[in-house]
Amino acid sequence: ARASALADSTGPGATKDGHAVPLLANIGGPKDVGAALENGAEGVGLYRTEFLFLDRSTPPSADEQEDAYRRVLEAFPDGRVVVRTLDAGADKPLAFLPAPAEEPNPALGERGLRMTRLHPEVLSAQLAALARAASGLPVKLQVMAPMVADAEEAAYFAGVCRDAGIEHPGVMIEIPAAALRARDLAPEVEFFSIGTNDLTQYTCAADRQVGALAGLQDPWQPAVLDLVAPAAGAGVPCGVCGEAAGDPALACVLVGLGVTSLSMSAPSLPLVRAALARHTLDECRRAASAARAARTAAEARDAARAHLPHLA
Ligand code: PEP
Ligand code: MG
């Protein structure tokens, strides 16, 4: 099945009837660019920048950051690169900052944008390095913040981006409040990217670090799909960059819900490209409706697959 899927798996992402869905890669740094290109990524949909900052006693210098960002940006001259600003917290503390307060629930604590707002010099240095790295390059640089809850936070982030010369700010949608009120966040930013890993964790109140809760940590949960819909319908381009985007059947469902691009680990790209190429946008929409009408994650998966007959 994999070999036949790979046979129809080149070129840009699109449904059978030609509805374009850019297929992008999740990367952790320049070392991941090769695999992204080999698997036909049209760009980067999630550049997790934590690796530059963790496990070191001094912050990365301006030159070090600029160099890492430029090596990624140069690899996609005709594409886009979506960089996520630092997503650290009490569970991933930064040794060069004062120790964060002990938190009983780090997933609900000062992480992501909440944390960089406490240390605005870290955020502004990162944004300045990104702007310098992109200057003179043809790539479209988009920059997004993690863990955004509401329109005020989205407006704050867009403001600091524009002050730093970043023209295309966006936010991750990974908190249910942000998904429910996506229409309030949309006017503040240029794009959304749904992080289904955290969105599922917060929707089902199931800590993603607790293996025993894996059954609830399932993006097929109809409640999660119900939160994707308003984000995808809020009037700004809306990608998905959580693990869900790399599941071929769920990728079709997400497209049926109105998601405009999919970003995943590079090895998942060929099978997702093939699944989209074999189904029409209408089939994806019917699969999405069937999944949302289901009562459980397992039923949603089965209901969607019944409308997607050509999965590998
Ligand atoms: C997510 O939450 O879905 C996501 C893409 O970000 P991370 O897995 O890095 O939290
Ligand atoms: Mg996340």
Image: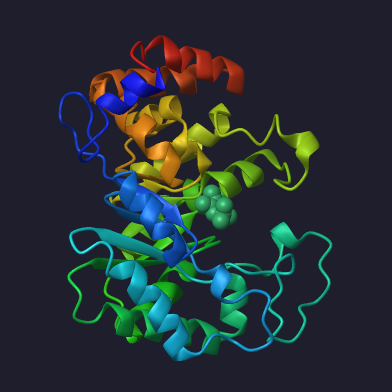
**Residue nearer the viewer, 112 or 153:** 112
Question: As drawn, is 220 to the left or to the right of 170?
Answer: right
Residue beneath the point at 42% across and 45% down: 266
- In-image side of 49 versus 25 (left or right): right
Say above or below: 212 vs 96. Answer: above
Judging from the image, the colouring scheme is rainbow
* Residue at position x 27%, y 60% in the image: 80
The image shows residue 140 at horizontal and vertical percentages of 23, 66
Q: Residue at x 52, y 19 (%)?
A: 301
Asked if residue 163 can be seen in this view, the reply is yes
For the C terminus, which image quadrant?
A: top left
Q: Is residue 165 positioned above or below 215 on the image?
A: below
Residue 267 locus on image (x, y percent)? 44, 40
Quadrant where the N terminus sits is: top left
- Above or below: residue 258 compared with residue 79: above
Position of residue 32 measured from the top left corner of the image (x, y, whole percent): 44, 58
Toward the viewer: 137 or 213? 137
Residue at image coords 20%, 64%: 77
Answer with the quarter of the image where residue 11 lies.
top left
